[in-house]
Image (tube, rainbow, N blue to C red):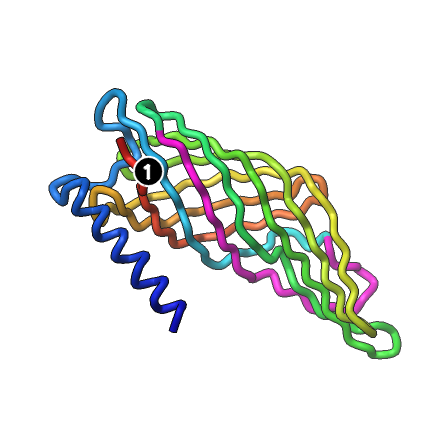
């Protein structure tokens, strides 16, 4: 029940924000006039596909699951020109694989990550955007094999993405984003397609 109340308050806030800035306008990634600034939040998630099997030992009888999930949260500063900057984080699972050893004991390994990236964004059109960023990935490997073991590692990494944002109002848009994320130090990369809610929550 508390979760439902939070969602109701969130959507009511979006509705009020839309009324304040006017319904005759639509959300745009490009500045419409000089000296116009905004803070914009992007939140979304979707499926991801792990493109490398480097984490799975070759000598084990293994079954790899390349499909997983990716969730992202991004806060961007929109000045009165096309180039923008912000911070992105989230959560993703690079891969999951099951294996059996020589005496037929089963184990499961999952590699998860939390990225913290500085992101640059350029609006190609009012609705099409390009993103690029770099930073670090906080990696966590969970091994369930004759007990549970967790190991952590920090990896330098980057991301690139392209998104299309459909305006719902002057301050809210619904976006779809194709994203490539790579923890380059450990050679782990994932391609994801996300559905996003984009909210221009502060605009002046």
Residue position marked by numbered label 1 in the rendering: 128
User: Residue at 20% of width from left, 47% of height from top?
Assistant: 18
Q: Nearer the viewer, residue 13 or 30?
A: 13
Above or below, comparing residue 128 to residue 106 in the picture: above
User: Residue at 28% of width from left, 57% of height from top?
Assistant: 11
Above or below, comparing residue 174 to residue 36 in the picture: below
As for residue 166 lying within the magenta part, the answer is no
Query: Which secondary structure class fits the magenta region best?
Result: strand
As for residue 71 lying within the magenta part, the answer is yes
State which quarter of the image contains the C terminus: top left
In the figure, residue 103 lies in which quadrant?
bottom right
Q: Position of residue 87 (x, y in %)?
A: 50, 38
Q: Nearer the viewer, residue 108 or 116?
A: 116
The region drawn magenta spans: 55-78
In the figure, residue 91 lies in which quadrant?
bottom right
Q: Position of residue 38 (x, y in %)?
A: 32, 33
Q: Position of residue 83 (x, y in %)?
A: 39, 26
Horizontal side of 137 relative to 26 (left or right) equals right
State which quarter of the image contains the N terminus: bottom left
Which residue, as the protein is rendered here, is positioned at the far top?
A: 34
Horizontal side of 165 relative to 75 (left or right) equals left
Q: Nearer the viewer, residue 57 or 24?
A: 24
Horizontal side of 61 relative to 166 (left or right) equals right
Q: Secondary structure at mark 1?
A: strand
Which residue, as the protein is rendered here, is positioned at the far bottom?
A: 104
Above or below, comparing residue 150 to residue 175 in the picture: below
User: Residue at 36% of width from left, 31% of height from top?
Assistant: 78
Q: Position of residue 89 (x, y in %)?
A: 53, 46
């Amino acid at each position: 029940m508390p979760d439902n109340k939070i969602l109701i308050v969130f959507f009511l806030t979006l509705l009020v924000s839309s009324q304040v800035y006017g319904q005759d306008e639509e959300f745009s990634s490009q500045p419409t006039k000089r000296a116009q600034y905004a803070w914009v939040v992007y939140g979304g998630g979707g499926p991801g596909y792990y493109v490398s099997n480097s984490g799975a030992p070759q000598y084990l009888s293994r079954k790899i699951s390349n499909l997983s999930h990716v969730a992202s949260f991004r806060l961007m500063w929109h000045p009165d020109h096309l180039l923008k900057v912000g911070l992105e984080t989230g959560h993703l699972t690079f891969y999951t694989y099951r294996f059996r050893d020589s005496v037929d004991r089963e184990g499961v390994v999952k590699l998860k990550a939390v990225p913290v990236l500085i992101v640059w964004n350029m609006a190609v059109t009012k609705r099409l955007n390009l993103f690029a960023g770099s930073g670090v990935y906080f990696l966590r490997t969970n091994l369930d094999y004759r007990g549970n073991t967790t190991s952590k590692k920090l990896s330098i990494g980057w991301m690139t993405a392209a998104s299309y944002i459909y305006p719902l109002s002057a301050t809210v848009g619904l976006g779809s984003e194709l994203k490539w994320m790579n923890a380059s130090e450990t050679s782990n990369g994932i391609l994801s397609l996300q559905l996003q809610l984009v909210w221009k929550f502060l605009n002046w």
